[in-house]
Image (tube, rainbow, N blue to C red):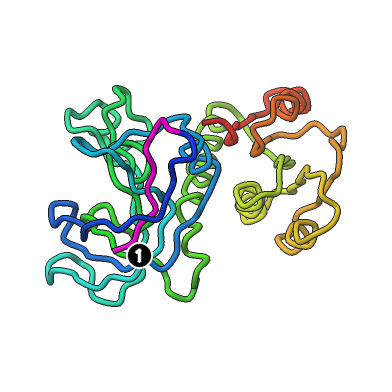
Amino acid sequence: MRAVTIVPGKAASQRLDEIAEPAQEQGSLLVRALAVGICGTDRELIDGDYGEVPPGRERLVLGHESLGRVIEAPAESGFRTGDVVVGIVRHPDPVPCVNCALGEWDMCRNGRYTERGIKQADGFAAERWRNKPEFTIKVNPALGLAGVLLEPASILAKAWEHIERIGRRARWAPRLVLVTGAGPVGLMAALMGVQRGLEVHVLDRNDTGPKPKLIREIGAQQHLKHPGIEFDIVIECTGAPKVIAQAVAGSSPGGIVCLTGLG
């Protein structure tokens, strides 16, 4: 079958390969790929900045943002043929550390986790992939190809969860939110803020193209430059140092700044 692979640590090594069918030990669910998302992480992997192959291998299959349809599932798995699914990217370390033992794999303390398409585990950019049921999420088929956004959406869900945990340490009644950047991550951050009943502002310099319309449609306000308002919550989604500094300086006393653009 075909798959997109790289040699981690070697720039511009990406290619479309013919590889073997996924091994049974990777999981009892066999999935046919419907879509794979591409983000900055993939670009950094292709640039050779990081990445690790599975043990004994020379190349890594890319792809950590997945969407697929189950074509083989054991009766006791909780899945059936035709289910639309997404694979969980990070798997806990085998020790495990205290956070992995509690199910907080994204907060692994010892670095022995694996990540599909990134660290010591093949990704989902293949015609077919296998996964364990406990690391697979069913997706409403009505979402269509937008279901591939579940993985990046989970990052924003975690960001909002941590923002709210921190806010609950004291009396906290947030009203104003600033999201910097109107890429897919920024737009999802803004949408989740609107869903919480907050007044959401989006800082993005693009005044043409689809972004202004998308910002309006989700119920937020766009600014081409910082509006000079002190915000209760700032969610930074660009990773640009100047924007980060401005975001921190523009937060209110006791405000919370979440940097999602750094990895």
Position of 117 relative to 194 (above/below): above
Residue that mark 1 sits on: 85
Q: Quadrant of the N terminus?
A: bottom left
Indicate yes or no whether the magenta region holds residue 7.
yes
Position of 56 relative to 205 (above/below): above
At 33% from the left and 71% from the top, the residue drawn is 69
Position of 25 relative to 72 (above/below): above
Name the foreground residue: 137 vs 116: 116
Counting the numbered discs, the total is 1
Query: Could you say where residue 74 lies in the image, as x and y percent from the top left?
Result: 13, 69
Q: Is residue 183 left or right of residue 106?
A: right
Res 24 quadrant in image: bottom left
Res 8 quadrant in image: top left
Q: Is residue 144 left or right of residue 59?
A: right
Query: Could you say where residue 9 lies in the image, as x and y percent from the top left?
Result: 41, 30
Q: Amino acid at mark 1?
A: Val
Position of 6 relative to 143 (above/below): above
Indicate yes or no whether the magenta region holds residue 215.
no
Name the foreground residue: 81 vs 160: 81
At 77% from the left and 26% from the top, the residue drawn is 246
Residue at disc 1, secondary structure: strand
Query: Could you say where residue 146 lies in the image, as x and y percent from the top left?
Result: 52, 65
Magenta residues? 1-10
Q: Is residue 102 left or right of residue 166?
A: left
Name the foreground residue: 38 vs 235: 38
At 78% from the left and 27% from the top, the residue drawn is 250
At 47% from the left and 60% from the top, the residue drawn is 148
Mark 1 Cα within 10 Å, few/some/many (few <14, many 20+)? many
Query: Could you say where residue 252 lies in the image, as x and y percent from the top left?
Result: 75, 27
